[in-house]
Amino acid sequence: MSDLVAAYLFCAGAGSGAAFLTALYGLVAGRRAAGPGSPRVRAELTRVALASYGAALALLVFGMLCLVFDLGRPDLALKLFLRPHPTMMTLGSYALAALAAALVALIALELRAPRRAGAPGPRRARVAAQVAAVVAAACVMVYAGLLLGASDEAPLLTTPWLPVLFVASALASGLAVAMLALALAGSPRLPAVRALAGRLTVRADVALIAAEAVAAAAYLASAGAGPIGLGAAAPLLAGDEAGLFVGGFAVIGMAVPLALDLAQLRGALPGWAYPLAAAATLIGAACLRVAVIHAGSPVLEAPLLALGFA
């Protein structure tokens, strides 16, 4: 598999994770975080939501373009929708399309929010779009790991813990996208924005990094328990991909942001630590996918999109 496939998996994971978490927060918290009679805070949170949804949509579109370029035949990509087959790739393609449509709707609704904030019609439409985004994003996060397992018989790809690891990584990288959106589009002077940046997202980041670490350990143990034994995980831990998996994913992607998060919770670091932790998480997520694809399936010749017609 090429690095374009790794780029697709990274963009799909980070984009769907950001869409899932942002839409879920919108469903759970709604506009209550702004408080009554706070138009400035509502406008600020709308900017944050727009930045997060926009980044998620851009990642999804770029990821789909990477997949099409890896295939080299855009007409085959269209046939996934015009002549669908019951394959994992087809189901994932429909989930990606549904998620992109939900994000477009959410962006349009957020752009109208200042003018139609109290109207029941837009409020119901926003809830419907948020539910659609949550469901479609969950499907996209799950199917990537299942797709790799269906494409090859390599022990590193067929373990059932690979989808779990990819979902944990997608949620962590999606939260990192949302954190960057909050840092760039939010005003740190506003109480609601400070609460999101300080108490909610940093604590959630710690929890998701811990979940990533548990999933990664279970993934390596599961791969090592197969017919090849511990040699199956050797390329990731001590072989050609160890620099990406250990250095990029484990150290930069988990240890660095975890240390920054814990220091931020103690109030020991300035504001630059917040976006830095998010950026490190994204770097680690990209390294994870490149390392797993290179180590797990170094000789698979068929483009991934072509598997949608297998």
Image (spheres, grey):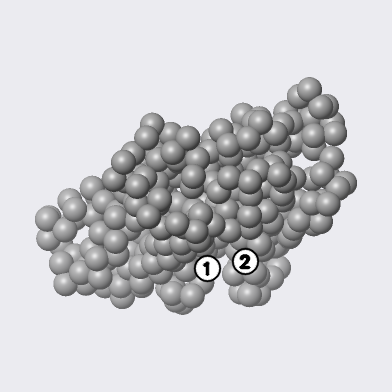
Above or below residue 273? Residue 78 is: above
Q: Earlier in the sequence, mark 1 or mark 2?
A: 1
Q: Where is residue 36 in the image (x, y as percent from the top left)?
A: 26, 63
Q: Position of residue 199 (x, y in %)?
A: 53, 57
Residue, disc 2:
279
Q: Where is residue 33 in the image (x, y as percent from the top left)?
A: 35, 59
Looking at the rendered structure, the secondary structure element under dot 1 is helix
**Where, by quadrant of the figure, is residue 74 drawn?**
bottom left
Residue at image point 53% right, 42% down: 144
- Image mark for residue 157: none
Are circles 1 and 2 on residues that touch, CB within 8 Å?
A: yes
Looking at the rendered structure, the secondary structure element under dot 2 is helix
Extreme-right residue of the structure: 238
**How many residues crowd mark 1 within 10 Å: few (<14), some (14–19), many (20+)?**
many
Above or below residue 226? Residue 162 is: below
Residue, disc 1:
180
